Image (tube, rainbow, N blue to C red):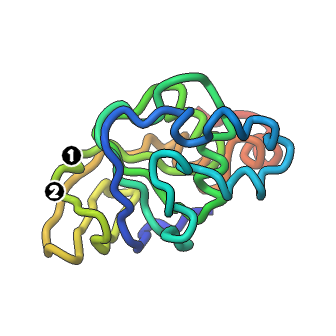
Amino acid sequence: MPETVLKGKAIKLGDNVSTDDIIPGRFAHLRSNLPELSKHIFEDLVPDFASRVHQGDFLVAGGNFGLGSSREHAPLVIKMSGIAAILAKSAARIFFRNAINQGLPVLLCDTAQINDGDQLEINLTEGVITNLTSNSRLTSTKIPPLMFAILKEGGLIPYIKKHKDFEL
């Protein structure tokens, strides 16, 4: 279950990060070995990603994050790597829903003023991001109540197992 307020370091990416950038196709054979697959995320785009990421960090991206094929493994291995949330100017719709279904928050906001390595505090329920490094604040889209309930349970499958249905 995600905390309401998250704190961590920004790992900044650019625009148009695809699911192929997240999981290079040559590692598709590792889909049944997720811990091993998670060691190779962003390997071509950010070669030192695995050594830079720490539990609770945030991915900060530009526009169109997660474009490409519908690989539900992409948000799952991002979460497994330690990333607590993704901040992006925009995200591919299928990636956004796959991330929520895997228990990984995606917040849409103007990420231009966030730099690589900035320390951030994110209030998921209020949609407020505080950049502790630059002492600035920005707002993000708020997570709808049903999606937040799914995140609180750790993803769609744990939510369905517990609630058996959606309470709309």
Residue 109: give x, y in percent of width and height: 26, 45
Residue 27 - label: none
Circle 1: element type: loop
Quarter residue 5 falls in: bottom left
Q: Using the rendered view, name the quadrant where residue 6 is placed.
A: bottom left
- On the rendered structure, is 45 left or right of 15? right
Q: Which quadrant, please, contains the N terminus?
A: bottom right
* Residue 19 % position (x, y): 55, 33
Q: Is residue 121 left or right of residue 58?
A: left
The residue under the point 74% across, 35% down is 28
Q: Which residue is mark 2?
A: 113
Q: Residue at x 23, y 69 (%)?
A: 131
Q: Amino acid at mark 2?
A: Gln
Q: Residue at (14%, 73%) from the top-left corner?
A: 134
Which secondary structure lies at badge 2?
A: loop
| Whether residue 56 can be seen here | no
Q: Which residue is mark 1?
A: 110
Q: Is residue 20 above or below residue 107?
A: above
Q: Residue furthest right?
A: 32
Cβ–Cβ under 8 Å for marks 2 and 1: yes
Q: Amino acid at mark 1?
A: Asp
Q: Image point 77% across, 40% down: which residue?
A: 160
Q: Residues within 10 Å of mark 2 (few under 14, many from 20)?
A: few
Residue 114 falls left or right of residue 154: left
Q: Pointer 1: residues within 10 angstroms few (<14), some, or many (20+)? A: some
Compared with 147, 2 (above or below) is below
Q: Quadrant of the C terminus?
A: top right
Residue 53 lies, in percent from the top left, at: 51, 68
Q: Is residue 113 left or right of residue 142?
A: left
* Label 2, label 1: how far apart the Cα atoms are: 7 Å
